[in-house]
Image: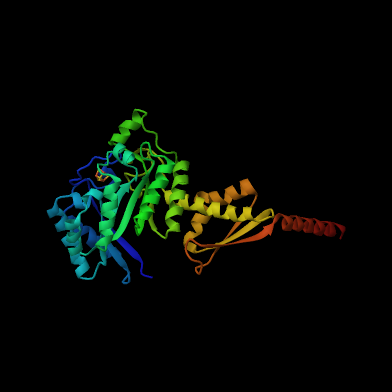
């Protein structure tokens, strides 16, 4: 299978008509100046030089602000620049991210002209009150209309949702995932809300009006959402914001994050927790006391099975007195596992008895 590479081009706040409560787009994208076609070309060339895989599947992605809400001339310049690489075969496709209310038939026809393949919509919530509370400036009806149009025009549809927006509850997040599933996206991104400097949310946080989700709770909710999307075979392309100098631990001097469930390996926490549940679920179904369990997974999943800083290994030992043995097998499908109980408590006691007997025999000799 071809390896996929994404060349990210961050288009900051440029012309975004909104001021969402959580957004300081310049911090999130790590890009403080406006994007031009020359800068875009330089970024693309630099990335292409570092990708030495002839078989690579390369995509140019305009992330950051609301691409289709920026000045049309700038959009066209950037798209033309990217399209040149598609035409000369160096890049396979183009992706953009934008707001649901910045999509209409004419915009989509224009994007088609430049062979844009994927459109990601910032949805954030399916609850209109929460959207309003976060000053999103669009409704969920806009999301529905835009999603249908995007699919109708033959683009790949992506959705981005947030977890922990002001006044949003676990049930709201689950309802958002359910509503998105109905709109049939090909992929989703899940972002737990972080309080970023120079945002309205920072002010609310300082005034005690907003309490961010604790890390553990954010992981628990994301776990439920990930399961829901996996069950429907929807690709989850990101869980948690990408680490950059600006999006890093609040203790870091350069960090723009003030508070919230930040973790450098947030997705791994979510996936490890899911593996832990799967292993414990399997153990609990058996009518015996398990002492040792062997889990065989694809090498890609091994870190998640063990857990961040071996958390799953330690938890299984501390809570259930079970030893976890990890085996890797490339033939096991990613995300799947073979779980085998290799020792029950009964076997363990027999082993211990055997060792004792052996000791006794030795001492007699
Ligand atoms: S629409 Fe996007 S870019 Fe604009 S303020 Fe909201 S989150 Fe930021």
Quarter residue 149 falls in? bottom left
> Ligand 1 falls in which quarter?
top left
* In the displayed structure image, the side of residue 362 where residue 173 appears, left or right: left
* In the displayed structure image, the side of residue 199 where residue 314 appears, left or right: right
* Front residue of 268 and 140: 140
Quarter residue 118 falls in? bottom left
- Could one spot residue 304 in this view of the protein? yes
* In the displayed structure image, the side of residue 162 where residue 335 appears, left or right: right
Whether 105 is drawn above or below 262: the answer is below
Residue ID at (42%, 60%)? 233
Residue ID at (34%, 46%)? 126
* Front residue of 163 and 81: 163
Quarter of the figure with the C terminus: bottom right
Across and down, in percent, residue 207 comes to: 34, 28
* In the displayed structure image, the side of residue 11 where residue 219 appears, left or right: right
Across and down, in percent, residue 3 comes to: 36, 67
* Front residue of 151 and 84: 151
Whether 96 is drawn above or below 138: the answer is below
């Amino acid at each position: 299978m071809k390896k996929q590479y994404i060349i990210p081009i961050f288009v900051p706040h440029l012309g975004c008509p909104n001021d969402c409560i959580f957004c300081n787009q310049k911090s999130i994208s790590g890009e403080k100046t406006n994007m031009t076609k020359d800068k875009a070309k330089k970024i693309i060339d630099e990335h292409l030089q570092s990708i030495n895989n002839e078989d690579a599947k390369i995509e140019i992605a305009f992330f950051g602000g609301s691409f289709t809400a920026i000045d049309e001339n700038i959009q066209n310049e950037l798209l033309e620049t990217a399209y040149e690489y598609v035409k000369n075969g160096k890049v396979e496709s183009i992706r953009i991210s934008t707001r649901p209310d910045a999509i209409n038939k004419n915009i989509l026809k224009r994007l088609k002209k430049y062979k844009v393949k994927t459109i990601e919509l910032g949805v954030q919530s399916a609850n209109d009150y929460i959207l309003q509370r976060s000053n999103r400036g669009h409704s969920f009806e806009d999301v529905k209309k835009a999603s249908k149009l995007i699919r109708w025009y033959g683009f790949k549809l992506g959705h981005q949702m947030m977890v922990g927006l002001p006044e949003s509850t676990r049930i709201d997040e689950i309802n958002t995932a359910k509503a998105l599933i109905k709109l049939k996206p090909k992929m989703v991104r899940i972002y737990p809300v972080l309080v970023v400097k120079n945002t309205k949310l920072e002010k609310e946080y300082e005034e005690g009006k907003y309490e961010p989700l604790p890390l553990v709770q954010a992981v628990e909710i994301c776990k439920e959402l990930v399961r829901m999307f996996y069950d429907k075979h929807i690709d989850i392309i990101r869980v948690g914001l990408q680490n950059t100098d600006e999006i890093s631990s609040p203790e870091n001097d350069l960090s723009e994050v003030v508070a919230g469930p930040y973790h450098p390996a947030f997705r791994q926490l979510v996936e490890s927790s899911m593996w832990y549940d799967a292993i414990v679920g399997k153990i609990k179904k058996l009518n015996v006391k398990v002492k040792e369990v062997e889990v065989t997974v694809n090498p890609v999943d091994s870190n998640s099975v063990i857990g961040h800083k071996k958390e799953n290994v330690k938890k299984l030992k501390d809570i259930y007195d079970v030893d976890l043995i990890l085996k890797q097998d490339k033939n096991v499908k990613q995300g799947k596992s073979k779980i085998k109980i290799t020792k029950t408590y009964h076997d363990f006691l027999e082993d211990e008895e055997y060792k004792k007997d052996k000791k006794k025999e030795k001492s007699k000799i």
